[in-house]
Image (cartoon, rainbow, N blue to C red):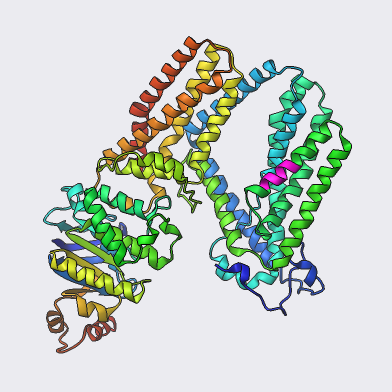
Amino acid sequence: MLDLQEVTGGYAPGQEVIRKIAFSVREREITGMVGLNGAGKSTIIKHILGLLEPISGEIRVQGKTLTDDPLFYRGQMAYIPETPKLYEELTLWEHLELTAMVYQVEKTALHERAAQLLELFRLTERVDDFPTEFSKGMQQKVMILCALLVQPPLLIVDEPFVGLDPLAIQSLLELFEEMKRQGTALLLSTHILGTAEKYCDRFVMIHQGEVALRGTLPEMREQAQMPGATLDEMFVSVVRGQ
Amino acid sequence: MSEDKRSTPSTQARPTTDTSPNHQQHRHKRLPPNATASLSALYRGRLQNTWVNGLLIVGQIVRNQGSLVVALGVTVLYALGYRAFLDWLPDTFPLSLLIAAVLAFLVAKSSVRTLMVEPDLVFLLPAEARMGAYFKEAVRYSSVVSVVLAVLGAAVLLFPVYSYHIGDLTVFWWSLALVAALKVWHVYLCWLELLARRRNYVSTLIRFALSFLFLFALYENLWWPSLIMLASLLLRTFLLKWVSQKSGHYPWSRLVSHEEATLSAYRTWANFFVDIPAVKNRVRERAWLVRLVRKLRFDHEQPYFFLYARTFIRHSEYLGIYFRFLLFTGVVLSFISNYWIALAVYVASLYLMALQLPMIGSELRYPDLVKLYPVAEEQKVRSFSLLARCLLLLQSVLLLLPLLWSGLPWLTLLILLAIGLLYSYILSARNLPKRFAEILTEK
């Protein structure tokens, strides 16, 4: 679904933040991207989204790059950012309506999906309110609702659990599992290694702008030469340069 | 933020300035000499930055050719309208009523620039007891700037009528002095309203009404009524001061949101001329207007019309600027009885409005998400063009209303309307999409 081939990039020419990043995100799998603050995870996501252009290397979604077919490329993915980014002048329902229009979701599908999601995240009563006045956790729920409404082939999520209450985290994880079963490819950038280990099928461990380890847990243990190690132990080992 | 209920230790020193909500209870406590100096310096530093940023934006506006055309256009419209008004003005017209209303409006529309930002709720809150010095600077600065602007405004609005119609400038100079004195008073009242949690439309209306009645009575040489109005204004001041002292704490969140609203208003005005990042603005629901837009069907082809129309309606300033411009042009048109001048003003107003509209769709004001949508750029242009067409067509129709009083024949008015509608269509279908597309590709 998503292929990064030797991607080097950053915010300005000559200032590379990520170097030779290569990994894939497959259908019916959750790929966890883990790394320290400042490791380059958000920069990688910005490159995938097309907000930054790679200095070298290629990013393909279903075999196409952003330049090949921008509408197709963008139409394949939905994104949940780390911090909520909402329209000041739109109500919660209007956020959902706009998302449906933009991603060509039919009106009947919008109503069906929105009703389920609003119920799940306990926001049914707030549909006519302005989300910019919600608490940060609730704003994040709105971002999640909008992304899930689209039912995209590829979902990119940056630190999904920050600011959410335990019930919302559980609902979100169950939804991710359900989406995975239905064929969605998920890329999850997170710090919460325990949850990542439990729910992700594959991992990419980013350290200082490069891929340190990648693959399934057994594959990473082999690469790190740490038989029986947990994700947490491998992470600490990579970060400490052991 | 529950700032209204927040308490500070009673042992802490309280500000000794009259900008404190409860200085009287604590004025016996002395502060160390340098305790408040740093906070005054903080305000002055912020003021300097604000001016530097403001001047940079003014520089950008001046460099923008469109803004020069608008400035010139508005000046010409103003001069034409004023001239037509003076020609029309009968001797029996209650001029003192109009002058009192204009001056009362100028003094009542006051605000205090506290230059506060959201992090202050965390970083300055512990210094609440010493914030009097900071706010004293804020009130002083706001008074000076407000007086200059109000006096300038009064001079521009009233000089022609005094000079060419009344023919005696003595009252004019006295009026300016009166505006200056009243303005200082109103800025202080505005500050007290903020402290007393009474800053709203009703408070402004009360100040306007009292000042209007005072000025009108004064111009009519009704000494007792004018003194009564002055006493009422004084009473209002004491009342607000008493209420503000009851709480004993600054309304931090309100001060921050008041500053944000002021900044947002300035930025929106500037945004009509140059593209600058938006700041947090007050959103107004305006359900009755959005209901009109909702009548449009759910359309996958027009997602940006959905977004732009709601932004235009709900943003605290866009709609206000649109209607204020309509009102200004409408007043000018209502005094014009010459067909050719009316046509020039009517068409010029459409062009001037159209010149500023592309900024509504500026991507700087939307979250990054808008860049990720799988929607072709042409749709943005098409949606913007549709919104611009609606606004300009509405303007063409509404601006015809004041011309009904001008005495122009019906056929002439119909021709004017036809020209207005046609020109609106041409502007929104040809000129504006090109300009809007240029703005999008500049990003």
Question: Against A169, is B293 above or below?
Answer: above
Q: Tell me what residue is drawn at x 51 percent, y 46 percent.
A: B316
Question: Against B195, is A190 above or below?
Answer: below
Residue A34 position in % (x across, y down)? 26, 74
Question: Against B354, is A162 above or below?
Answer: below
Main secondary structure type of the part rendered in magenta: helix
Q: Is residue B320 left or right of residue A157?
A: right
Residue B232 position in % (x across, y down)? 80, 48
Residue A202 seen from this side: yes
Quadrant including the N terminus of chain A: bottom left
Residue B433 position in % (x across, y down)? 34, 32
Q: Tell me what residue is drawn at x 26 percent, y 54 percent.
A: A111
Q: Is residue B388 left or right of residue B19?
A: left
Q: Is residue B399 left or right of residue A6?
A: right
User: Which residue is the extreme one toward the right?
Assistant: B224
Q: Tell me what residue is drawn at x 34 percent, y 73 percent.
A: A37
Is B206 one of the magenta-colored residues? Answer: yes
Quadrant including the C terminus of chain A: bottom left
Comparing B221 with B30, the one in front is B221
Numbered range of the magenta stretch = B204-210
Is B74 one of the magenta-colored residues? Answer: no
Residue A108 position in % (x across, y down)? 22, 50
Q: Is residue B194 left or right of residue A27?
A: right
Comparing A2 with A173, the one in front is A173
